[in-house]
Amino acid sequence: VKVTREKAAENRRALVRAAARLFRERGIDGVGVAEISKEAGLTHGALYGQFPSKDALVGEAVADGLRASNERWRTAGRGGGPAIGDLLDSLVSARHRDNLAGGCPVAASASEIARQDEAVSARFSEGIEALVATVELALAALPAEERRARALTIVAAQAGVMAVARGVAKASPALSEEVIAAARRVLGEVAGEAPDPSA
Amino acid sequence: VKVTREKAAENRRALVRAAARLFRERGIDGVGVAEISKEAGLTHGALYGQFPSKDALVGEAVADGLRASNERWRTAGRGGGPAIGDLLDSLVSARHRDNLAGGCPVAASASEIARQDEAVSARFSEGIEALVATVELALAALPAEERRARALTIVAAQAGVMAVARGVAKASPALSEEVIAAARRVLGEVAGEAPDPSA
DNA sequence: TGTACATCAGTGAACGCGCGTTCACTGATGTAC
DNA sequence: TGTACATCAGTGAACGCGCGTTCACTGATGTAC
């Protein structure tokens, strides 16, 4: 059942996008190749025509998820450019917490990526660098020598905040809200926001 | 092969400790009941005598790991009490990054805990509250109304920093060191440490 | 304290199931003429 | 432009394997007398 080259490329993209979404939602070990293929409208045999192994697909999915996240971050500001307040509002929020499938893969898959092979680590590193660069753009108001350290911290910290907020959410919704609110304010200060005068 | 009540309780603890260690090291989905039992010197049948399911053991293991972490945090200060500088030195460090099996379960299992059931979420919430209380003790120098927000942020942020540092370590060791150094300094400021005069 | 026996912690074979991966096959595509 | 056929993307049955869980059984423990 050969298909056109364009259709084959489209199928490949569908596999990567389905994998990225399902991995975020249920974990890398929690989703099988059969389900990914089905979600993409194919059989698992087709997956092995496009990728040599599940591990290879994991690498592509991580890279794709980070690329998509970076694009969203870059346009998080209402004006089109990234404003740090808007960026933090969308990253450190109940909305991001509840959008596991569509959110940031750093937050959704953080602890699992440490257990993948070096190829995945390389794609993950590239993605992190890109996200940090985006946050640095949003920190233009800070002294140049401070931007990178604070961008690195914000990228990593938001992932931890989301993971903790999600972990406690089922049993302690109030604690989940509290950690988000606290981190939003404290990371705002890290980013150079003036403390809220209404507080 | 009945054993004494004390021996049975000891076996139960061995199962919990083996599970906690292996889950941190290779993920909750990445370790089976057979391996946990073997590590504890038992067969998988014995495990089902002590716990109704793997899920139940996951809850115990998460709770136990957090309890052990909290004990270590409380005594992180050289003087016996928790000093925030010493605490951050041990949490946000290359040593903690490389000690996956013995480190903090918030950092090691963060993204997986969000996918567990409500019982696990409840144990996790209790553990987080305890860790936050410990960090609050170390923040005694800050105004009382600031302590909890900053403690919450530090607990969650260090988990994200460790997850990111571990994820990039295989392919980008320099980036891994950089994110740790940056986060150590920035979280120090969050905790009220004076900026390093030698910098 | 000594004996008889019910209790029950632990054993290990067996269960159905879904995993990642392979491969002989199909049939539309895309090329050579 | 029309025909013949080699290519190869996708199909689906099959593989061995390890998963979580069950259960009939074993034999030392701990209790009743």
Image: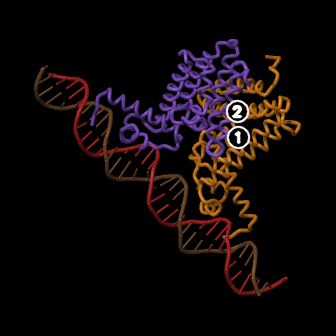
Chain colours: A purple, B orange, C red, D brown
- Give the tally of numbered discs: 2
Q: Amino acid at mark 1?
A: Cys
Q: Chain of mark 1?
A: B
For the residue pair C24 and C27, the one nearer the viewer reads as C27
- In the rendered view, tell whether residue A140 sits above or below residue A150: above
The numbered dot on residue B87 is none
Q: For mark 2, what is the residue?
A: B158
Q: Name the element at disc 1.
A: loop
User: On the picture, is B29 further left or further right than A183?
Assistant: left
Q: Quadrant of residue B88?
A: top right
Q: For mark 1, what is the residue?
A: B104
x and y, in percent, of residue B56 in the image: 62, 55
For the residue pair A55 and B136, the one nearer the viewer reads as B136
Question: At x 67% / y 50%, what residue is drawn?
Answer: B61
Question: At x 52% / y 23%, what residue is drawn?
Answer: A72
x and y, in percent, of residue A136 in the image: 62, 17
Q: Earlier in the sequence, mark 1 or mark 2?
A: 1
- In the rendered view, tell whether residue A108 sits above or below residue D29: above
**Label 1 crowd bin: few (<14), some (14–19), many (20+), radius 10 Å:** many
Q: Amino acid at mark 2?
A: Gln
The N terminus of chain B - image quarter:
bottom right
The C terminus of chain B - image quarter:
top right
Question: At x 80% / y 25%, what residue is drawn?
Answer: B192
Please say if the residues under marks 1 and 2 sit with CB atoms less than 8 Å apart.
Answer: yes
Separation of residues labelled 1 and 2 (CA atoms): 10 Å
Question: At x 65% / y 21%, what residue is drawn?
Answer: A151
